[in-house]
Image: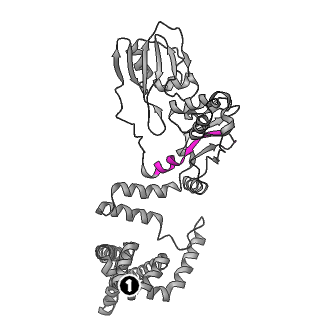
Amino acid sequence: MSISELSVVFILLMFAGLLAGCESALTSLSRLLIEEIVEASPKYKKRFDLFVENPSRYLNVLLLVRKSCELTATALVATSFVENGTNKGFALAQAIILMVAISYVIVGVGPRTMGKQHAPKWSKSAITIACLLSQILGPLTNLLIKIGNALTPGKGFKSGPFSTEAEFRDLVDQASESGFVEESEREMIHSVFDLGETMVRELMIPRTEMVWIESGKNLRQALSLALRSGFTRIPVISDNLDNVVGIAYVKDLAKRVHENRDAELIENVEEHLRKATFVPETKTADELLKQMQRDQIHMAVVVDEYGGTAGLITIEDILEEIVGEIADEYDDDESEEVEWLSEGKARISARLHVEDFTEKFDSQFTAEEIEDVDSIGGLIAKHLGRVPIPGSTITVPGWKLTAERPVGRRHRIATVLVEKIEEASQITDQL
């Protein structure tokens, strides 16, 4: 290989390394960092404004020229090795291995590391080079992207696949590892991206856990249900759960009773309803959040493809997907599975397994009574036919079970009061 050819290869690799460093520096910049650079060096403002407006245009052209330099250098070295070697196959393999190693170090590792470590300083030269190359080769880059998209199954990307959400997520992860972003903040940022891919059915309260009231109930019954369940908005149904006629707001009912004490017995819930909002279960969470903010609604009824009630969703359900579980101010540590209060009286966890209950309390159930049920809370819900609220009671052989303390924003029953009674032959219940 002649000195001139060696010089050309060296120059190509050095320029490719420079472009790799430029690419690394530009992708490492945040908008805040760009503002600081522009404030210190105003002459770069126009170039950085163009980059912020359309970063893919400049990153794509850097990638094109870098790849061209690497491939040209590899071709020159391979040609020289083949011409001067006795075994062409072995010579070609040597050239490829040598160039892969050199390119990895000179182009792949060194410049990229320096570009990321010294992004503010390197970015000034990088943006100048990127702007110059984009003016010369920009149309060619766009043409190649269009050709690539035409040959690739699917719609493709108008700006090329090189600046994506995945890259941004990776930057957030790197910032978290470096200590610039807290772990909780990193999770929130990822959750915001995930919100656009999360369906309402993944976040909703399923219909089996909904607390509702019939439209024919009077105001006293509705207020009693609200106080016992802890909910301030309760869906009102007509014939069945698939026919939600509106939402009862506790403040509306309380206001009416305060104005007219007799109303709590002579007026029904259906006379004081607010319009219910219905959304399909396939709607994305971010779209629903925007709708709730725009229309100033707090709760929506989720319907399935057949128009039946699939569940219920509130704005807190969506926010929890971003910020995590929102604890209730009355929540405390979970109680023990079994706490004996006196002889014949105990407080148990609603999550206590049915088999453990039968063992500890010497009570027996038939296979039909505990079919599809694992916990005591599930047993109460099954035999009530609806979600248990504080005060809901069922009677099992030898014991009376009373739903006691709700926890969490969804007010799920946490504890159950168990009281000894005379032997009962089967389960009975009382809401």
Residue shown at 64%/36% (left/top)?
236
Provide residue 341's location: percent of width, then percent of height.
34, 17
Q: Which residue is mark 1?
A: 76
Residue with the most extreme top position? 422
* 374 vs 227, nearest the viewer: 227
* For residue 165, side relative to residue 4 (left or right): right
Q: What colour-coding does the image apply? A: one colour
- Residue 249 covered by magenta stretch: no
* For residue 219, side relative to residue 81 (left or right): right
- Compared with residue 160, is residue 10 higher up or lower down, i.e. above or below? below
Residue shown at 41%/42% (left/top)?
327
* 212 vs 140, nearest the viewer: 212
How many circles with numbers are drawn on the protein?
A: 1
Crowding at label 1, few (<14), some or many (≥20) Cα neighbours within 10 Å? some
Please provide the residue range marked out in magenta.
304-321
Residue with the most extreme bottom position? 4
Provide residue 347's location: percent of width, then percent of height.
38, 21
Q: Quadrant of the C terminus?
A: top right
* For residue 128, side relative to residue 137 (left or right): left
* 314 vs 83, nearest the viewer: 314
Q: Quadrant of the N terminus?
A: bottom left
Mark 1: amino acid: Leu
